[in-house]
Amino acid sequence: MPLVAGLSFDLTVIWAFLIAFAVFVYVVLDGFDLGLGILFAVEPDRRDRDVMMNSVAPVWDGNETWLVLGGGGLFAAFPLAYAVVLPALYVPILAMLLALVFRGVAFEFRWRTERWRGVWDMAFIGGSALAALSQGIALGALLQGIAVDPAARAYGGGWWDWLTPFSLFVGVAVVVGYALLGACWLVMKTTGPLQERMRTRARWLGLATVGFIGAVSLWTPFLQEGYYARWFSGWGLVAAGGVAAAVLLLAALLERSLSLHRHEYRPFLYALGLFAVCFVGLGVAMWPYVIPRSVTIWEAAAPETSQLFMLIGAAVLIPIILAYTAYAYWVFRGKVDPQAGYH
């Protein structure tokens, strides 16, 4: 029996990291994709928009695989968390899903019409911005805490609890951060005047993103008492200092690579690094809760037999998904041009 109990603990932690990994991969892969759609709004030239869209055409629809994996994994491995979080965040989650669907339709239809191309371009911009905003609002609402009815083991709050100044602020922060990823992606994938404009925009978006990271980081400890204790005592204080130092270092490297050295690939890697550091900070703040300060990962976990069965499937599927994703990005590496395609 002790072995079974130990297995249960290990499986729960493994699944928590697997879901966190899936969510992070989705954020960094679909983040630049959504950011590119947001940047459509400031690039009215048709040829430039074609170049921008061609840069993600071969890979954009595969990025959402990780969103399905993260959501499905949460449902299967942590059913209590799924049962509480989904009702609490119905509005932003439904808005995100509808925006992704509408954005996908716009992506395909804009190539097949001349008369309505402008309409579908606006749909692409709106769908990208709404999806990014909804994701940020959902994150902010989760961080600020979700009311849980312990007796019913269900959501105990109201319909509009997710709508707060903090959640809206995080929503805008995610929109800006995704736009930074999109700009750095286009610096890497394009040439000429479009690349130069994106290089300039990436510098300003980088400053704005770091500002939002700082503001959210200073705001979060005061949302709940547990956050303050975690960040400003013991090892949490060391972790907070390390995260802050990493953010400043990556921000400096991003600025130098864009302005002084004028690198093409490094800005995108530094922008991804900013997201990775923020994700680590988020994990430190939330651990070991899946619903902050209310439900731990062990309280929300499915039975160990279910977790073990699913882990076997995940051990097979995740390497396959990683392999074909890496292969797709490798095949379509390099610059893009609307006339010549990839070269």
Image (cartoon, helix red, strand yellow):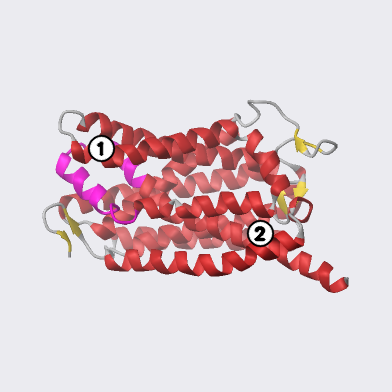
- Residue beneath the point at 29% across and 36% down: 41
Amino acid type for the residue under numbered disc 2: Ala
Q: Which mark is residue 16?
A: 2
Q: Which comes sooner in the sequence, label 1 or label 2? A: 2
| Residue 14 seen in render | no
- 1 vs 2, front mark: 1
Amino acid type for the residue under numbered disc 1: Phe
Q: Quadrant of the N terminus?
A: bottom right
Q: Which mark is residue 109?
A: 1
Please tell me whether residue 11 is drawn above or below residue 220 in the rendered image: below
Residue 102 in the image, given as x and y percentages of width and height: 37, 35
Question: How many C-alpha atoms fall within 10 Å of the one at disc 1: few (<14), some, or many (≥20)?
Answer: some
Which residue is situated farthest in the right direction here?
A: 1
Residue 91 in the image, given as x and y percentages of width and height: 56, 30
- Residue beneath the point at 33% across and 38% down: 105
Q: Quadrant of residue 39?
A: top left
Residue 200 in the image, given as x and y percentages of width and height: 28, 49
Compared across the picture, whether 199 is left or right of 243 comes to left
- Residue beneath the point at 31% across and 59% down: 258
Secondary structure of the residue carrying numbered label 2: helix
Please tell me whether residue 167 is drawn above or below residue 10 in the rendered image: above
Asked whether 139 falls inside the magenta stretch, the response is no
Question: How many C-alpha atoms fall within 10 Å of the one at disc 2: few (<14), some, or many (≥20)?
Answer: many
Q: Specify start and end residues of the magenta stretch as a single range.
A: 35-59
Q: Nearer the viewer, residue 5 or 290?
A: 5
Please tell me whether residue 11 is drawn above or below residue 286 in the rendered image: below
